[in-house]
Amino acid sequence: MRIATLPLRPLQTRSLPDYFRDRLHQGAAEQSIPTDEDTLWYLGELMSRFALSDHLFDANAGRRGIRPLALLYADARESADEQHRCRVLQRLGDLALFLGALYPEIFARRGVRRDYFVGMGSSAYDYLADNARANRAVFRRLTHRFAHWLNLIAFAAEREAGMSAGDILRLHTLWRETGNPRLAEQLRLLGIHPDTCHAVH
């Protein structure tokens, strides 16, 4: 007798930002980090945004790379336009959180310590808390206890079900670039709904 089997489906499908927000909620509870929905929303969007290489890397003289935080800080100081200064400082703060949380070992081998990310990121968010057009309260919270936010993002990026957040980000990026339905199915089995973003063909 042949028994019919149903394809595996996650109990709940989520967007990539929602996936990371679920992980951030879990981490905040386990680490007893006081937080709020607005800050977790911002951090989930941050992690998802940097999943796309176009958002993570800068194009400079035909080369793609991540502009060093110190140079971003210099760009912000030299800018005469307040809106541009705030945009640069937001990128600086976001990169300090993302890179400091996900790739500390790589930067440690280059002599870049954790307190560098804490100092640069918290300073950038401190300015935004007083001068940004939006999300001032979120930036104020990110300014304080910056090291705790690093820990929280690192937790959200830990391996789960055999895949790390980096693995999931790469899988999501590859699906966006190729539109491969098998990659889309892998994302759905992880509980991530790829159709919330459009693939690029």
Image (spheres, grey):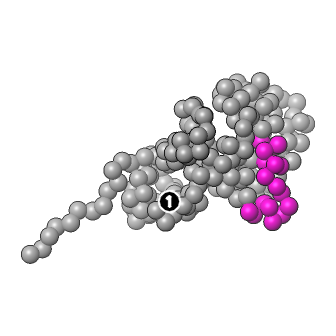
Magenta residue span: 105-121
Provide residue 100's location: percent of width, then percent of height: 73, 52
Write the residue at 35% across / 54% down.
10
Q: Let me know if residue 129 appears in the view.
A: yes
Provide residue 159's location: percent of width, then percent of height: 54, 61
Residue kind at label 1, given as amino acid type: Glu
For label 1, the residue is 160
Look at the image and say whether residue 108 sits in the magenta stretch.
Answer: yes
Crowdedness of circle 1 by 10 Å Cα count: few (<14), some, many (20+)? few
Depicted 36 relative to depicted 5: above or below: above
Depicted 50 relative to depicted 37: above or below: below
Q: Secondary structure at mark 1?
A: loop
Image-based side of 79 in relation to 154, left or right: right
Q: Nearer the viewer, residue 140 or 91?
A: 140
Image-based side of 59 in relation to 151, left or right: right
- Quadrant in which residue 32 is drawn: top right
Q: Quadrant of the N terminus?
A: bottom left
Provide residue 61's location: percent of width, then percent of height: 82, 56
Extreme bottom residue here?
1
